[in-house]
Image: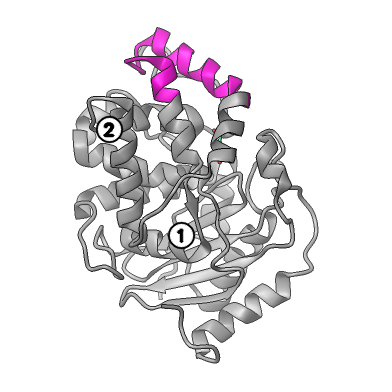
Amino acid sequence: QEGPPGDPLSGLLDQVRRSLRDLGGGAPASYIPELSRVDPDLFGLSLCALDGQVYGSGDTQVPFTVQSVSKPFVFALALADRGLEEVLTRVGAEPSGEAFNSIRLEPGTGRPPNPMVNAGAIVTTSLVAGDTPEARFDRILDGLSAFAARPLAVDEAVYASERATGDRNRALAYLMHNAGSLTGDVEDQLDVYFRQCSVLVTCDDLAVMHATLAAGGVNPVSGTRVVAPRHAQHVLAVMATCGMYDASGQWMLQVGMPAKSGVSGAIGVALPGQFGIGVFSPPLEEKGNSVRGIAACHLLSDQFGLHLMRAS
Ligand code: GLN
């Protein structure tokens, strides 16, 4: 499905990736022990156009766990199942200015700040339809697969590692349960969240998933409608303001496209009406975003004038 070698767009992606291959700095996440075993030199860059053509350079087909890049897509499923109004009673839509694992909840309501930080994502995961945790996870795996246009699977070793070391997420979930923003069995809700973070994707998958959001919810590869246009729009809006954690403002200033990062070193970008991008490079800066991933998106935005606020 990738563009033929030598096509101009793959050539441009190649240039961007090669110019950043030797960029140092950062380190792969280690707080989930299994993630620290990754090869830090892996580097892939993919783009999916809205005609469904996928272009790529580097390690575009190497699987890694989706981690927080799952959050926009599960938010989309929660919106599809519950509607915006109900979702907003349980989770906010304000940038937190804090780290991805921030423990701050809204006074009074107990709502986490937004669905892109861990606390908010644990809530949106719990809002996906299904009578049992298994049914909810099946819906999530099917939904992520529909966004990717291929069946996805879980990395069981990363899942076990997340579950064994996830005390901070556990603490967040119990706090939210106490505050009323998370309902149901807390351990069951966490289990679905840990599994969701451990779903394996590739750079090409991320490009297709984000192209689906950029296309208003229709997957350009499969032609299937995954979510309603207004829900894709809601998701892109929250990604634009909250997707890069406490680097979201700076990101909007310099890159100017809705994006989401994850601790595996993935960044997904969606330019509405244009394309989706997936980048993967494990070393992270101190805020938990991929060093080369950030640099690649800066370069692409600058070189091709992709900033959303650009007048012409
Ligand atoms: N599974 C990770 C966690 O919950 C996801 C965080 C991330 O990708 N930033 O800690």
Colour pattern: one colour
Question: Which residue shows up at 33% across the image and 41% down it?
Answer: 140
- The residue where tag 1 is placed is 206
Front-most of residues 285 and 308: 285
Task: Give the structural element (helix, strand or loop) at label 1.
Answer: helix
Query: Residue 124: x percent and y percent?
Result: 35, 32
The residue singled out by tag 2 in the image is 135
Q: Main secondary structure of the magenta part?
A: helix
- Which residue of the protein is positioned furthest toward the top in this rendering? 178
Amino acid under label 1? Leu
Tell me: residue 41, above or below residue 169: below
Q: Residue at x 36, y 56 (%)?
A: 151
Magenta segment: does it hold 238? no
Q: Is residue 22 left or right of residue 250?
A: right
SS category of the residue bearing label 2: helix
Q: Which residues are magenta?
A: 165-190
**Label 1, residues with CA under 10 Å away: few <14, some 14-19, many ≥20:** many
**Position of residue 217 measured from the top left corner of the image (x, y, whole percent):** 25, 57
Toward the viewer: 281 or 292?
281
| Amino acid type of the residue that numbered disc 2 sits on in the rendered structure | Ala
